[in-house]
Amino acid sequence: MTADRFAFTIAATDGAARTGSIAMRRGTIRTPAFMPVGTAATVKAMKPADVAAAGADIILGNTYHLMLRPGAERVARLGGLHDFMGWSKPILTDSGGYQVMSLADLTKRSEAGVSFKSHLDGSRHLLSPERSIEIQRLLDSDIVMAFDELVPTTSTRDVRAAAMERSMRWARRSRDAFDGGGEHPTRTAIFGIQQGALDEDLRRSSADALIEIGFDGYAVGGLAVGEGQEAMFACLDFAPGQLPADKPRYLMGVGKPDDIVGAVERGIDMFDCVMPTRSGRTGQAFTRTGPINIRNAKFAEDQIPLDPACDCPVCSTWTRAYLHHLVRAGEMLGAMLMTEHNVWFYEALMADLRHAIAAQALSSFANMFRERYRGTKE
């Protein structure tokens, strides 16, 4: 099923968890969904066809990185991000707000936006809500994110409140810029981002403001920034419920497999994280019994797959011993195969979660997953 623009359907629920689909013109996204991160127009170490074969219905691109290199205007001249990178399914683009505040040098925040110095060449830029939306339109993103301001959860209450309130003003400007974008709004969707750190009342005020503006979906922002799983789950015990039940809920930048399971139990529908690809490039593989470091000497003659329960192309073909050799030798193929396995693992986890919700068996699945996953960690 496809839709001209955006249609979210909930097929089944189990407690706070939901499973369903988002129909868009470039394809249908099964939820709960994990979006592999293609920051700079590539999911690192993987070809687009292999990302799709792993089960991904959508990937994430990033405004900050693409505006600096190769440039949004250039991508537009070359036919848009999908044609440029060879990915035909939906793409969600991050607004760039997180990266501009964590990677760029000499940032200066004001009501206009964020002025910053590029981490690549030192050039000066201003990223505002209007410019962020313009870049995402030039990229021809399918799901556009509103521009927001992120501050650490350890900031003072006044700082957290001020950042949330500014983010809501920027959300209105993002929505207005999106609606004024010619044909683009008729083919795409825009999500607002709830802020407020770990404060329930700030999150409520943020949600109310976003609902008044009106968005196609709503993200829970400002988490997975060092607060720890317990604090994150405590926030997710109330934050998703403050957002509309008939719209997708997206937890940005999460995360570890057990983070995802816990967040799905609390009503989250969409996720993204660099963890499966970054871990693959550094020799870490995710398995049903927990992550393993393939560099460890004990794997040098281990002739079983990375995960005997996995049916990905890597586990169906190669042994831990071979992958240990590739990674220790610094061979490019090692990073490619480890990454491919990890992305398959994440997408298989999402498929299992969807099935468990539909079967009204999420609690037993989640408990079994946690018991098994935490049993062996290296």
Image (cartoon, grey):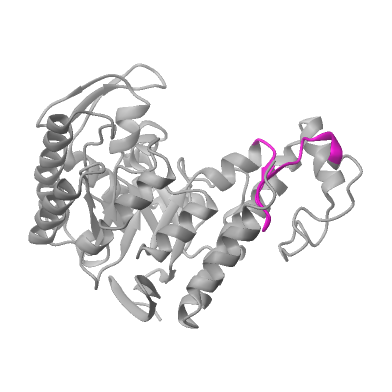
Residue ID at (36%, 44%): 231
Is residue 348 among what the camera can see? no
**Residue 271 place in picture, x, y as percent:** 42, 56
Above or below: residue 244 compared with residue 230: below
- Quarter of the view holding residue 372: bottom right
- For the N terminus, the quadrant is bottom left
Above or below: residue 357 compared with residue 240: below
Magenta residue check for 287: yes
**Residue 266 place in picture, x, y as percent:** 36, 63
Magenta span of residues? 282-298
Above or below: residue 121 compared with residue 97: above
Residue ID at (30%, 42%): 222
Camera-side residue of 290 and 234 = 234
Residue ID at (65%, 47%): 339
- Quarter of the view holding residue 14: bottom left
**Residue 103 place in picture, x, y as percent:** 37, 26
Q: Main secondary structure of the magenta part?
A: loop
Is residue 13 among what the camera can see? yes
Camera-side residue of 291 and 64 = 291
